[in-house]
Image (cartoon, rainbow, N blue to C red):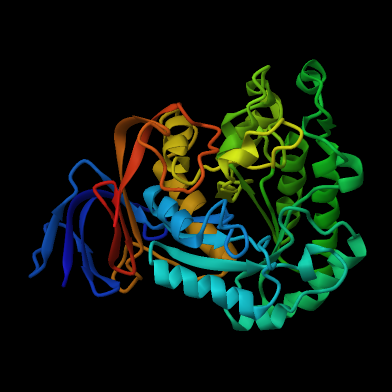
Amino acid sequence: MALLLKGAHVVDPVAGIDGVLDVLIEGDRIARVGEALQADAEVRDLTGKYLVPGLVDMHVHLREPGFEHKGTIESETRAAAKGGMTGVCSMPNTNPVTDNGTVVEYVRACAERAGHCRVFPSGAMTKGLKGEIISEMGDMVAHGAVAFTDDGRGVQSAGMLRRCMDYGKMFGKVFMSHCQDEELVGDGQINEGPVSTRLGLAGWPAEGEELQVVRDIQIARLTGAKLHIQHISTARGIAAVRAAKAEGLPVTCEAAPHHLFLTDEAIDGTYDTRLKVNPPLRTAEDAAAVRAGVADGTVDAIVTDHAPHADWEKAREFEYAPFGMTGIECSLALVITNLVKQGVIDYARMVELMSVNPRRILGVEPVSIAAGSLADITVFDPDIVWTVGADGYESKARNCGFDGTEVTGRATDVFVGGKQTLRDGVVL
């Protein structure tokens, strides 16, 4: 049945739209966009809400297969729908590792069965994420992999990274780089500096990330492969990406809310393990530089690095708790609250960061609020005030570093190929 969405403020920088319009959905496509539309269709009044091309989080850990005690494709895509996402890119550090077409196909099949959002699987660059042997890239692409990454560890050998890029660039996919020099980082727990000293925790120097950011940009120049820097967190890392873009290199990068809006000063004598992330929370100066990168176009995408863990895993001593926090259910609200409402960016730029650019980088079908486009749509109320975690989580995990934070703005409705997956804030 056709569906007519009435009276929403539509924002789509690709279509050049920023105003109140009606949107008619027929099947899995947008049929018409315009003022005062009439149609034989179910009508939804969205007055006072914003309607944008469906959001995509291009850095998410779904945990399945192998770590279902942390999260499942069912639970984490429910969380994605709750957060307003119409699609996510899943990371390959599963068990077995997503390093061949069979695992890619499994992830896709589970996601289709769950039906809460689209899942675009990434595949490992190297077999088993060990950095020793190139993975079965062609097999994974044939089964739907959209990118390659050794996320969670990174390719430690420059020579191996070059071989991966030289071989894999024939498939036209982006290489997403987790920048972490393990020899320099060592047993680091939080950012190296006054806070790590005061708390007696092993420091993780910013240079442990920045050296590989620079290295990987150089290898991208050498090979001509498309490079995407994951979860960038330092001022010098941002500067390196800015310089690469000025040179015209095929380099993009992403930032996560916790690196934008939290700093290592948030970690105190309570040793809250929800704030233990990889890369770690950095200084206020680093966070300001990443926000500046969001504003000036250096940062291409805002992602969550959504990393669910079981309660008992995060309940251990700080040194033994795993890295990572959840965030997919509150990322939209955090961006609205801390960037849009503060005048750092506008809604059009937000759509670029959370919808347009992620699809472009991943090379998946673009979506627009225009006739003929896939009906992947996110609707949100920009003025709802709520507290993160107050009404629970759809995610199987609760390790959200923003738990208890009051935010403004929340997704109310989500459509994936015309199928509604979130209605009035409730996952269907």
Which one is nearer the viewer's eye here, 115 or 159?
Answer: 115
The quadrant in which residue 186 appears is top right
Which one is nearer the viewer's eye here, 78 or 256?
Answer: 78
Q: Is residue 309 above or below residue 259?
A: below
**In the figure, is residue 119 to the left or right of 173?**
left
Return the residue found at the far front: 312
Q: Is residue 407 above or below residue 149?
A: above
Say which quadrant the N terminus sits in.
Answer: bottom left
- Which residue is found at the position 51% from the left and 31% from the top? 402
**In the figure, is residue 91 to the left or right of 278?**
left
The quadrant in which residue 295 appears is top right
Q: Where does residue 344 sit, x and y in percent of width and height? A: 50, 32
- Which residue is found at the position 69% from the left and 42% from the top? 322
Q: Where does residue 196 sit, x and y in percent of width and height? A: 79, 23
The answer to whether residue 337 of the structure is visible from this angle is: yes
**In the figure, is residue 140 to the left or right of 161?**
left
Say which quadrant the C terminus sits in.
Answer: bottom left
The answer to whether residue 291 of the structure is visible from this angle is: no
